[in-house]
Amino acid sequence: MTSQVGSGFEKSARSRIQRGFGEKFSAFSADRMALVSAVFLFAVGMLVLLAPILDIQDPYEAVKSMRNAPPATAEFLLGADGHGRDVLSRMIWGGRVSLLIGILPTVSAMVISLFLGIIAAYWGGWFDILIMRSLDVLFAFPLVLLAIAIAGVMEPGVVTEILAITIILIPYISRLVRTSTLSVITQPYIEAARAGGAGSTILIFRFILPNMIAPVIVYATTLIGLMIVVGSGLSFLGLGVQPPVADWGDMVSEGRVVLRKAPHVTLFPGLAILFVSLAFNYVGDGLQNVLNPKSAKR
């Protein structure tokens, strides 16, 4: 009898999980642009991850006779750049760097911001004043200019880009975390948990964090697209990825000197930056409908 009851409970739990997943997927799929964007990003992600085993040109091999070759020339589907390197191959390999620079700093900043924002809101007092006033200093500078300033005093490279972007994102995400946490800790179930003897660790990780993280995830998702643009801008200015490493921003920078003669060198990586950035924004909108149904468009 006990085993039958346990088995029934497990089936019921699995049914609720499956039903919940189905409802969330339906809510996400209702936004067609979000669904198409998610499929597009998945395809791009698989393409760049499989770059080492794809049958494509060496992104660093320069064929002098193919300099600035137009698209659909010989084996160069998207043409060649000023050094005679395959644009398509460099875009695929460059996507590995560009996506890394967009995703890793955003995730890192979100983790750090969750720590800072929750501490500021939960304990308040001097913790709140010290953390938030320190972060307010960074708000005095425009986001892009701050990233340029941070990257400018460090040695150019991928690590520099990641650190610069992580630093500039922390104040923005921390403010949202603090606001979301303040709205949660006033809820009756938090008071009930306190009355039941729950300590700070249990309150934060079991009650506060799960109930305030949804808007943070949505916000971070939309920031990834913007950070790809910022990272590409740093590479364009020579403060990020250094040649000959392929990167979309660096490819745009290299193509500007032959813009009239070979516009495809700049056009294709520029379109990659545009479409991937827009896709992350649309996915963020779709997640908003899933994680915060009250804000979904009616």
Image (cartoon, rainbow, N blue to C red):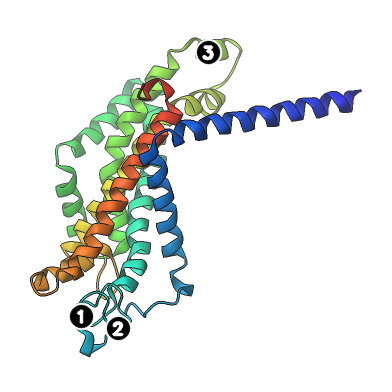
Q: Which mark is residue 189?
A: 3
Query: Can residue 153 be seen in this snapshot?
Result: no
Local packing at callout 2 (Cα closer than 10 Å; few below 14, some 14-19, many 20+) is few
The answer to which image quadrant residue 32 occupies is top left
Q: Position of residue 223 (x, y in %)?
A: 31, 42
Query: What residue lies at 63% left-to-right and 31% top-to-bottom?
Result: 17
- Quarter of the C terminus within the rendering: top left
For mark 1, does the 10 Å Cα neighbourhood hold few (<14), some (14 to 19), or many (20 or more) residues?
many
Task: Give the residue pinned by disc 2.
Answer: 74
Give the labeled residue for mark 1.
69
Vertical placement of residue 28 versus 54, above or below:
above
Give amino acid for label 3: Tyr
**Residue at (25% x, 44% y) in the render:** 168
Separation of residues labelled 1 and 3 (CA atoms): 65 Å
Say which amino acid is labelled 2: Ala
Of the image marks 2 and 1, the number of the one nearer the N terminus: 1
Residue sitting farthest toward the bottom: 65
- Left or right: where does residue 174 sit relative to residue 268? right
In percent of the image, x 33 and y 56: which residue is there?
101
In the image, 139: left or right of 296?
left
Identify which amino acid the numbered label 1 is placed on. Ala
Q: Please provide percent x and percent y for residue 154.
A: 22, 61
